[in-house]
Amino acid sequence: SRIEDGLSGAEVVMMDTWTGDGLPDSDPVTALLPGHPAYVVFTSGSTGLPKGVLVTHAGLPGYARTEIDRYAVTEDSRVLQFASIGFDGAVLEWLMAFSSGAALVLAPAGIYGGEPLGRFLAEARVTHAFVTPAALATIPERPLPDLRTLLVGGEACRPELVRRWAAGRRMINVYGPTETTVVVATSDPLTSPDDTPIGRPVYDTRLHVLDPGLRAVPPGAAGELYVAGPSVARGYLNRPGLTAERFVADPSQVGGRMYRTGDLVRWGADGQLQYLDRADRQVKVRGFRIELGEIESVLAGHPGVGQAAVLARDDQPGDRRLVAYVTGTADADELRRHARLALPDYMVPAAIVVLEAMPLTANGKLDRQALPAPERETSGREPATDRERLLCGLFAEVLGVERAGADDGFFDLGGDSILAIQLVARAREAGLGLTPKHVFQHRSPEALALVAHESVETAVTDGDDGIGPLPATPIMAWLAERGGPIGGFSQTVVLRVPPGLGLDHLTVAVQAVLDCHDVLRLRVAGPG
């Protein structure tokens, strides 16, 4: 096969025919050492391709001990599994539960925040949870007497969240770049909305605040944060140049290494680190770390674009959004479609502003401070029914615009997945049953008015006939753009089945899965 041809010299195991015969019954010859890789997690890269971070086993024991001690985890605890396995926050949750003998409570599929997450926390009696501030902001206030420890991290925690959630429990701000073992600093329990430090180093980790000459700055002075110790990752997978740039020698320890975070911080009087800003152009939006240059590279690749610049704007307090600025002949809708083919949803700009020319500084460089705030224009069509009027008002309220027209698109006005959850919650409070899937599929007040249910209960999404064309996902588009064959890829997994299952029962089960999941029936159609 083509796959085997591309792996010449390597032992290939065909899982659909492999029986497992010949495996040794002894321990592996190569011992597992702390410096061996534990996992690879991918993070945004400025070149347009994600970069894989190779994290070792060395930092796991120290962080596991930190979790048990600082988060007060016991064998009776119930730890929420909420983070995606593509996000190292999942490692935080696994370690918290398994290192202490606690229970790991898996959140059901389809719960991303809002009232459903709040209800699940209560019903599952979760005692320990890690939730990003963006998701936490969507959960309505309700009694959660079992929730003893709440961890927040991934982005800045706003004061109002501390005000709402800190009372009656241990609320801790956690900090850790992907290039380290999950978390390298944890705050003391938060008590004041005006003070949300990123905290003190976890066990076995050293944090240095240094000036550009790698000299320590005095307490209270701003400097760049460097992480040292066993929690530092090995480097970027197959990227030696980038590894050498970000992972540097530790002047305080012979043979030691540090990771340069790019974050500006300072030591507070209480011995905790306070986060100030980014030293480079890497930003965090709703918990995702994003290289703005990666988005600029994709937009600039469109033939109708001359220049492209992207900012993370905070035009409304606590509401950070990506805004793109371009020059050229392409319009905003065309560029948004182009971006969705190459970028994950969280990296598609909420607004795209087309300019005649980019503003420049006196020395001819792009003046990012002079880039204007986006104007969210509406279609102007007035709502025709009570439902449309209600939904137009909710659009304007959630999106922070003066008004929304009946045929305005939710995402065209700056909406995203988190705001979609807020829209669904407020619609339910007003007596309209909607789901986030409705918002993604129908988008405008006019269309949503037709599918909403007159009920405060969760609306049930009707299935469709499961046929018709489907736009290419970013990974599909990326594979197609590489120019190679795309018709022969496969993925296999070994499943354990009950004894005596039989071919007939297996066939019925597989057919049921195919009937329920349209995506499993996808095929690539040729021209025409």
Image (spheres, helix red, strand yellow):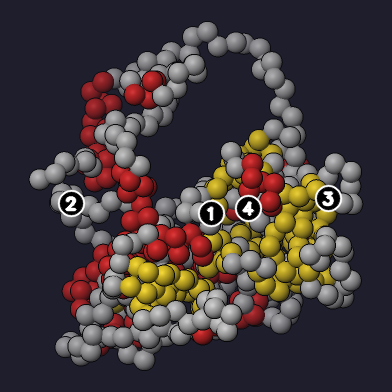
Q: Marks 1/2: CA distance? A: 31 Å
Nearest the eye: 362 or 92: 362
Is 202 drawn above or below residue 38 in the view shown? below
Residue type for callout 2: Pro
Image quadrant in which you'd find residue 528: top left
Task: Tell me if I can see residue 350 in this picture.
Answer: no
> Tag count in the figure?
4
SS state under label 1: loop
Chain-order first, disc 4 or disc 1: 1
Q: Mark 2 and mark 1 in contact (Cβ < 8 Å)? A: no
Chain-order first, disc 1 or disc 3: 1
Q: Which residue is mark 4?
A: 178
Q: Which residue is mark 3?
A: 250
Q: Is residue 109 left or right of residue 86?
A: left
Label annotation for residue 73: none
Image quadrant in which you'd find residue 161: bottom right
Residue type for callout 1: Gly
Q: Marks 4/1: CA distance? A: 12 Å
